[in-house]
Image (cartoon, helix red, strand yellow):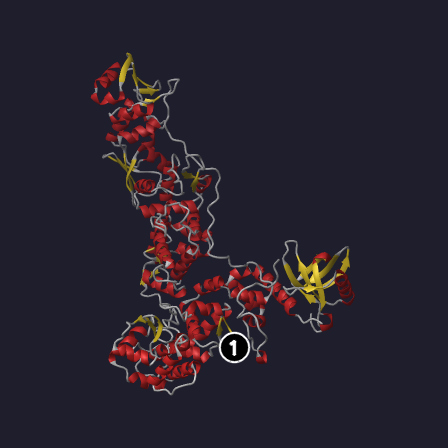
Amino acid sequence: MTTSRETGSTADTTGSPGVGGAPRTLAEELRTRPDDALAGLLRARPDLLNPVPGDLTQLATRASTRASVVRALDRLDRFALQVAEALAVAPDPCPYATLAALMTGWEDLPGDADGAVDGAAVAAELPRAVAVLREQALVWGGEDRLRLVRTARELLAPAPHAPGVSSPTGLGPTVAEAASGMSPGRLQEILAAAGLPATHDPVSAVAALTELFCDRRRMAALLAGAPAEAAAVLDRLVWGPPHGTVTADPAPHLRWLLDRGLLLPTGPGGVVLPRETALHLRAGRAHRAPEPTPPELVPVTEHSVRLVDTTAAGQAFIALTTVEELLGAWETGGPLVLRAGGLSVRDLKRTAATLDATEAATAFWAELAYAAGLLASDGEVDERYVPTPAYDDWLLLPAEQRWSRLAAAWLAATRTAGLVGEKDAKGRTAAALGPELDRGPAPEVRHRVLTLLAGLPEGASVPPDALLARLQWERPPRTATDDLRSRLALWTLDEAEQLGVTSRGALSGHGRALLREPAAAAGVLAPLLPEPLDHVLLQADLTAVAPGPLRRPLARTLGVLADVESKGGATVYRFTPDSVRRALDAGRTAADLRAFLTEHSRTPVPQPLAYLVDDIARRHGRLRVGAASSYLRCDDESVLAELLADRRSAPLRLRRLAATVLASQAAPDALLEGLRAMGYAPAAESAEGDVVVTRADAHRTPPRTPPAPVPDGPPVPDATLLGAAVRAIRAGDLASTTPRKPAAAPATSAGGLPRTTSADTLATVQAAVLTGAAVWIGYVNADGAASQRVIAPIRVEGGFVTAYDHTADEVRTYPLHRITGVAELADDVV
């Protein structure tokens, strides 16, 4: 059975009220916050809402758990995190003035070789950073008693007895922490070497040494007598890491430091620079370089707004044609799905050759089509990737709407094509369309990158390094070796260029609209897209030039009749015997092809092209291949005789059955390919003798839904949920903290719920109905979860009590047998 309290750390959540009304716990401070402040906490840390805390003590306990604190620290900007790190190494509690000194340092101390800190900027931004930490329940207490929650202190402060472990500030443990295991005799020797009088116990000895190290004047005098080599050792340790090693017989300059406690032992051969010593050497600063303000986005390069928009629109159209080409190539026989999921390296390379693109770009286009719901696996026994039915609907949309669908899917997708080809911790290579490509922060990073670009003047761009510096200030990486957000940002910049959201590093007009609303982006893009053409330019060298994008029916037919030779602003198609035969195999006649070329060419049909079509059409189908194992027939006996005499036909193992018929031991498809390789144009025929049209049928998956993004933590709650949660927490807190009448105080369970007999419960509730008073009850729901509530009973009948529940802020009905007990409240409450 669960109760309204949660187990866990209670250092920041329990205790009696402070003197003079000052909160002594985090729960007490949360109790003084207005509802909008509580809503802001729950909005900033949505993990605290799952499930809704029963009261403010439970909320404070949950806000102090390790997982929740780690998540909250990860979302701080660099300066707010630096302030939290400074509080972790400051006295607990820490006055605001002490914190400010840790951030700005002692400006009047000479020898600050690291340069002056911008104290004015730090002082101006420090209240904001403290407010952020307070709003997120990481800091509580008054200005004279700022306290970092214990879990955050444990995460950000060094472990006293862990050699090699230090704070993110580079500060080591305090003198008291580092000297906790030293013998009393050794402590007295250190006092004597430092010029301090002897003490009677280790506690006072440590206190005297700490006082010396915190006294700026006396500490300066002590360090003035240090050997030059000793000062060099301190310089190496001062900004961290503060740990080092010494031999069993240290050098004289190291012995000088050890004798005076400026280096304290951490174990066999290990030493550490005490925090107080390091702060003195740092001129009182917790950080070498506080960063109170985000780095500027400079230098800014101006581009022509029209040039950026038109270039980006052109790239957007290329993106559409590339996705169509990819899915068109896969609709008649897509690549197989790997057993572990995803696309094989061989199929990725083959598709890249088809698209005339790099493998990385091909992986991006495939992932984009998958995220938009246009591509999926068909679910067959030999599972393949093929277009979905949504692809057909997508093709019917205007070009600008097709682009906005792709761009919106890209912006919201958690799948990250940039990971394709990388190896994970187990050495497995990530495959395109594989299951391991989701990264929760991807949508947020994409939005943030585009938002930063949108904040620049129209047509302006900045170097990627400037964007990365800003992003790293807003969300500092946990480690320098694994900065996922920076990699996501670089991939975002590259993908935005490929998709036509940006051009030359500047955000386009339709890119700005995309941030507001994808439908608005379509409206902005529409006038910029090139108008599809219904004609080509035929040339005498058996090529056709498309001076721009072609209408889809023309592009499809021309793609069958000719091969794409080059792409770009103008696409060049080349007519070959194989391409013409391909069109004839698809059911077209020579007359159809000549009419098609005449209709769609702005130039006369060149004579070489007309001859090529007529020649292939005249020879097409003269040889007929059917199934015996296979047979070959031709009305022209001389052609068959020529074929039998050709040495290249030996692998086909042909023999004459009749004057116009040959038999082969090869399969029909192998016989077709062999004859085509020899320069013939055979046609397959059915059992009835009709020519078989070899046009491939398009394959589609069953209806599929696009992949759902993998969230990066709990979703941000909406205003309705926040309001209901705050009311529930307030009511639960009222139920747990409301004073009871001493005379009516019932027995309570271990979980704090009231316990009364059934008769006493019924009598107290009935009396409350008559007097209109509120009562405190314990209640166990159908799932066995126990809670305490404050209710105002309205009526009691049939074994149920109907009452206004202050916890739920509504009228509810409770079975009497589920009420564990009831107690009257003090007269001045509710």
Q: Is residue 770 left or right of residue 374?
A: right
401, 240: nearer the viewer = 240
Q: Residues within 10 Å of mark 1 (few under 14, many from 20)?
A: some
218, 306: nearer the viewer = 218
Provide residue 243's location: percent of width, then percent of height: 33, 71
Provide residue 668's location: percent of width, then percent of height: 33, 23
Is residue 313 visible in the rendered image? The answer is: no
Provide residue 825's location: percent of width, then percent of height: 71, 70
- Is residue 785 shown above or below 101? above
Q: Quadrant of the C terminus?
A: bottom right
Q: Quadrant of the N terminus?
A: bottom right
Q: Amino acid at mark 1?
A: Gly
User: Residue placed at 38% from the left, 31% from the top?
Assistant: 696
In this view, the residue farthest toward the top is 658
Q: How many marks?
A: 1
Residue 117 position by quadrant: bottom left
Q: Secondary structure at mark 1?
A: loop
For disc 1, the marked residue is 142
660, 598: nearer the viewer = 660
Provide residue 661's location: percent of width, then percent of height: 30, 14
Is residue 755 visible in the rendered image? The answer is: yes
User: Residue placed at 43% from the left, 79% from the top?
Assistant: 98
65, 319: nearer the viewer = 65
Residue 25 position by quadrant: bottom right
- Is residue 719 shown above or below 406? below
